[in-house]
Amino acid sequence: MLLKRTAPTSAEAMKMIAEEFGNEVVIVSTKQVAHGIEIVFACAQNTLEKAREAQPPRPEQAQASRAPLGQAVAAPNTEALAREIEQLKALVQQQFSQMSWQSWASGDPMRGQLWQDLQDLGFSPMVGRTLVDSIPQGLNHSQASAWVIEAITSKLTALQPEVEMVQKGGVYAVVGPTGSGKTTTIAKIAARCMALKGRNSVALITTDTYRICAIDQLRTYGKVIGVPVHVALHSGELEAHLQAVKGKHLVLIDTMGLSPRDVQVTEQIGLLDHNEIHKLLVMNVASQPRALAEMADRFRGNGFYGACLTKLDECSTIAGTIDLALRENLNLMYMSTGQKVPEDLFLADPQFLVQRAMRRQYDAAYARTEEELNWLRYGVANDVVRSDVRRT
């Protein structure tokens, strides 16, 4: 419902509105009238009813000039009022977002350009904002770009453990969606461990009885490197196999390759967490960033020990993967560049990965006009303001 209040000054009128209706109002207009300042505002029906119940009787002469409670400037029905208020909120959000972006872009265009550069490379708006907002004052574009690269590299380096998992040993389940490269990664890590710790240092277990030929694939790798494969058809067999191989330095478990949306994922991750098994997330760097984020969320359980990046030889843009590692605080342990066992497995190198992520790929089909850039910037700013409004 639209209402109005008039007082000698705008401050008095706003105070009057706040005392009667609280903060659940939307200011529509403010104008000068004969008796002072008139403010037109919108409020919901339940807010109006609460104000009526709470309003104490006051002498007429003690009150500033006002329209009586319930005397509406317009009196639409409840549904129409709700729509009108939502439209007003949307208008206010758009105005705030536009002012926010214009203030940032005009106040420091270099930061705005760097944010756009990170967007073009594949980083998320959130990570881009966090990095750009942290750039020290007084740097030019080249220096700021170098600072961003160093900041990302330092963060990834700090997340890495002091001791590699092959050296540390333990029980690790390799998890991830179908086609991410889990089985090949297990074979590579097992071969690496055997080279460092001896032929009898590794045990292999598979729970992937879901995918056709999955067991045969791991057994083939096992024969190549000389390690038998234990098959666990259910949770009881998994626990029995773990007990049987507890003397091994490193135990690697191949898990079912499932879609992140498959209901069996929850059961599988719950089984691993119940047995206190470390989870190594395998991420195909060629995957879409949002698909990677959904995958990490579904396979997380009680957390990841680390991650392995696969198929680096098949993808030229890996910023989305680095972005996820920053947001999830993932320890990037290994990177894989092909199918060869064990030659194509390397310890993850943050400096190499960041330099690769920051490498520009020019393609005219993906070039944006200045107008399109403004749409993108404005839209992101609007999303930020909208989320802030929802939290309030």
Image: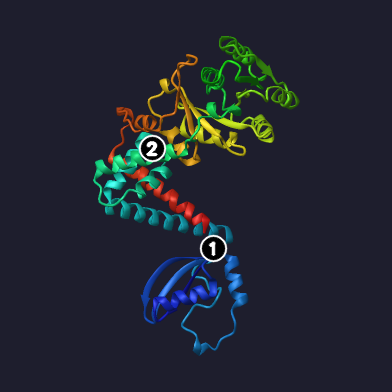
Q: Residue at x 40, y 49 (%)?
A: 381
Image position, residue 58 (x, y; %) = 56, 86
| Residue receiving disc 2 | 153
Image position, residue 258 (x, y; %) = 61, 26
Q: Residue 380, can we see it?
A: yes
Viewer-proximal residue, 131 or 222? 222
Query: Left or right: 311 with respect to 377?
Result: right
Image position, residue 343 (x, y; %) = 45, 16
Say which amino acid is labelled 1: Pro
Q: Is residue 203 above or below residue 133?
A: above
Q: Which mark is residue 76?
A: 1
Q: Is residue 41 above or below residue 252?
A: below
Query: Left or right: 56 with respect to 107?
Result: right
Q: Local crowd at mark 1 within 10 Å, few (<14), some, or many (≥20)?
A: few
Q: Residue 309 carries which label?
A: none
Viewer-proximal residue, 334 or 35? 334
Q: Local crowd at mark 2 within 10 Å, few (<14), some, or many (≥20)?
A: some
How many numbered circles does the render carry? 2
* Scheme by which the image is coloured: rainbow
Query: Left or right: 326 with respect to 115?
Result: right
Q: Residue at x 49, y 40 (%)?
A: 329
Q: Which of marks 1 and 2 is nearer the N terminus?
A: 1
